[in-house]
Amino acid sequence: MINPRTGSWAALLILALLFTAGCAKETMEPELFGSIDGMVVDGETNTGLGNVSITTTPPTDAIFTNPDGSFFIEDILTGNYTIQARKPGYANNSVAVSVRNNRTSIARIYLEEREEDEIINPEFFEASVTSWTNVAGADSNFVDISYRFENTSSSTVTREYEVTFEIVTDNINYFQQVTGSQLQPGQTRFGSVSLYIRQNTATDVRVTNVWVR
């Protein structure tokens, strides 16, 4: 005859073993990676556009296209991404792609030329990095950037602006864009942004380009 107390302990032991095995299976799920092979072209001429800023959501590497308009983002976690393309003189555009394990997804982005006047690196718009900090995670790193923008003009309203930051690391460099609108004459704007830099460590952060209109 089975002792009720012994039977209860045995049942609890079996349940504990099953729970532990389930947790172990869950934590041992491997991370899956794929890549994106992309191209940015002029919507009117269908020719490749170089030096186009490429960023993604969720964030991966922030890069620029090659002179022929091509770009490649490799070894990123599988899932759905939105790819944003920005270039002074062109309207921003984006496409959605799905990245699958051990596969290369294809992305093609068309940019239409802007008609409005624009200014590159104007003297009346000051952009600076006020501070930056490396933030280390369990398996990925981020860099937190604080910045300051000021319209030093006495009469010109900045209707729209885009500031590019370059993040120098011990491995490769990353780029991050911050956009905004309606900066009045004499107005100052402070802000911050966080950029995923994989397992790298930032050694410097600086402003490389300013576009306004």
Image (cartoon, rainbow, N blue to C red):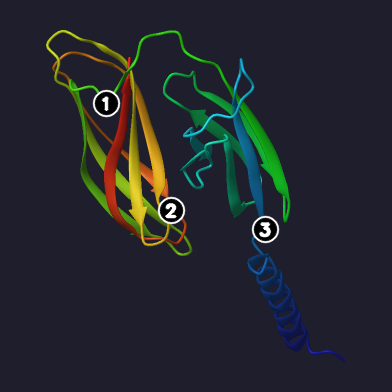
In the picture, which quadrant includes the C terminus?
top left
**Which amino acid type is shown beneath numbered disc 1?**
Asn
Q: How far apart, in angstroms, are the residues tagged by discs 2 and 1?
A: 26 Å
Label 1 crowd bin: few (<14), some (14–19), many (20+), radius 10 Å: some
Residue at which label 1 appears: 121
| 137 left or right of 85 in image | left
* SS of the residue under disc 1: loop
* Of callouts 3 and 2, the N-terminal one: 3
Tag 3 residue: 32
Q: N-terminal of the two: label 3 or label 1?
A: 3
Residue shown at 24%/37% (left/top)? 147
Q: Can residue 188 be seen in this view?
A: no
In front of the other: 154 or 49: 49
Q: Is residue 212 above or below residue 109?
A: above
Circles 3 and 2, Cβ within 8 Å, touching? The answer is no
x, y (%) of residue 204? 27, 53
Q: Which of 64 and 102 is in front in this view?
A: 64
Residue at mark 2 = 197
Q: In x, y percent, where is residue 56? A: 53, 39
> Looking at this view, is 46 or 6 the one in front?
46
Q: Mark 2 belongs to which amino acid? A: Ile
Q: Who comes first in sequence, dot 2 or dot 1?
A: 1
**How packed is label 2: few (under 14 Cα within 10 Å), some, or many (20 or more)?**
many
Give the CA distance from mark 3 to mark 2: 18 Å
Q: Looking at the image, which residue is at 43% across and 53% down? A: 197
**The disc labelled 3 sits on which kind of residue?**
Leu
Residue furthest out toward the right: 1
Q: Position of residue 25 (x, y in %)?
A: 70, 69
Apparent side of residue 63 relative to residue 99 in the rendered image (left or right): left
Q: Classify residue 12 as left or right of residue 161.
A: right
* Residue contact between numbered discs 3 and 1, judged by CB atoms under 8 Å: no
Q: Position of residue 191 (x, y in %)?
A: 27, 34
